[in-house]
Amino acid sequence: MASTVPSLVGEDSTTQFSSGLRRRKNNDPLENRPEVTVEDQTQPRLQAPQLQPSGNTAFVDSIISGMRPSQEDASAHRWAISTIDKHFRYFAVWNICTYFTLVAIVYAVVPAENIVYLDGVEQRSAIMAMSLIAVSFLSRVLPLIGGIAANDKKKTYISGIFIGALTVQVVAFCTDFLMAFFAVPVVIDPVLGTRVHVLRWCEWCPCATFMTFMMEGADMYWSGDAPPPDYLRSKYLHACTQGSAVFLGLLFPFCPGFKTWLFAMVLSCCLYLTNYPRMWNRRRDIPATLKGGATVEEAERFNAAKVALRLRMFTTCVWSIIVTLYFVSSVGPRFTSEGSILRNPAANMICECFFDVLSKVLFLVVIVDVHYAIFDPSTKVERRLNEMRQLMSAVWESSSDIIAISARNGPNNGASVMLSPAVFGLKIKQAPLRRGSAD
């Protein structure tokens, strides 16, 4: 009895699948035969690939559990990202406007005899700080210009927090530029007797507020399905506390007496010290490790929270150094002998320039990490695709069933087939050959 195998490719024939059976629909001698259904127990059933109990099964389980649907509403996280990103852009405009407003007010208030040109070590410190800020700024802006010229959307996406970090550097550059080449207000503190470069405090006041808000805005970790009701208000409130602390520092040299100066100093320190309980609470709220079986969305939030916590700890640490050096350079000359470096009138300027550059440059470095971890959509898509690639690779290598992937290629509609590694584990048994009968 002869049998023919139907062609798999043809314009006048189609292929129908039912429980693994394939038959021709046109010119089929078995056209009137009842179609086999899945209830037909004589036909083999299709089963899902089974994973081998190998050493990487735990890895496969962790990947599969990580790809399960999230129990939390992911739209709340997306809403928080888009909302805070818009507020970063608005805050960047506020930062520029507030800085130049304070500069104009200071030049109008300070007496003309206190508006002087810096020279010597003070001028060179300002030029050096300006140069370092410019190098840091250009190292981030030039790749963006190259991406625009190459029409590469991945390299030209700029989030609000990235714009904010660049804005902070622009303000710092303008301050150092004015102090290096123009006459600037310099007053004497009525209590400490130190030289106060007022433009530096005009820079720190809006920048400290904005940097605190970026530090707070990058922290998007909360418990529950939705952010707390005071989500934005708490971030603005903490940013205002730090901005107010620096603004009181701007008022130190203009205080009329010791009591007013002391009140401003105590209040400024109290507002600044709120950084530490805030950092401690966020470090306690964010878990140390990701819980088992977490979803992809939960892993995204956890990793973003870790990056934001690193930004918070770094910023608080650098600001603590600046505050400590302020008191050392202000009070130290009273307890040191003649010829000490703390007695040099330019000591305060040198410390301010060095740590201002350090805070701005390193802050931008961490902000770039935050940008890619939270706000850049193309990087987020790449992370998701990489997780899917790991999942499929684990299933491909651990399946006990044979998985075949075929694809057409070539001009003659050829086909290439790729088989999973399970094919190498097949054990084919052959029956012994029997001599056929002559009849």
Image (cartoon, helix red, strand yellow):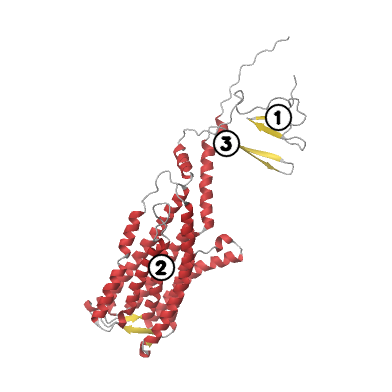
Report the amino acid beneath label 1: Arg
Res 82 visible: yes
Of labels 3 and 1, earlier in sequence is 1
Query: Are there few (<14), some (14-19), or many (20+) residues within 10 Å of tag 1?
Result: some
Give the position of the N terminus as an image quadrant: top right
Determine which of the numbered discs, if any, sits on residue 420 in the image. Answer: 3
- Count numbered badges in the picture: 3
Q: Residue at 58% across / 22% down in the picture?
A: 429
Q: Position of residue 59 (x, y in %)?
A: 45, 40
Q: Is residue 361 above or below residue 406?
A: below
Whole-Å distance between the Cαs marked 2 and 1?
70 Å
Q: Nearer the viewer, mark 3 or mark 1?
A: 1
Res 118 visible: no
Q: Residue at 40% across / 44% down in the picture?
A: 292
Report the amino acid beneath label 2: Met
Whole-Å distance between the Cαs marked 3 and 1?
27 Å
Q: Nearer the viewer, mark 2 or mark 1?
A: 1
Query: Are there few (<14), some (14-19), or many (20+) residues within 10 Å of tag 3?
Result: some
Residue at numbered disc 2: 211
Determine which of the numbered discs, if any, sits on residue 23 in the image. Answer: 1
Q: Is residue 190 above or below residue 63?
A: below
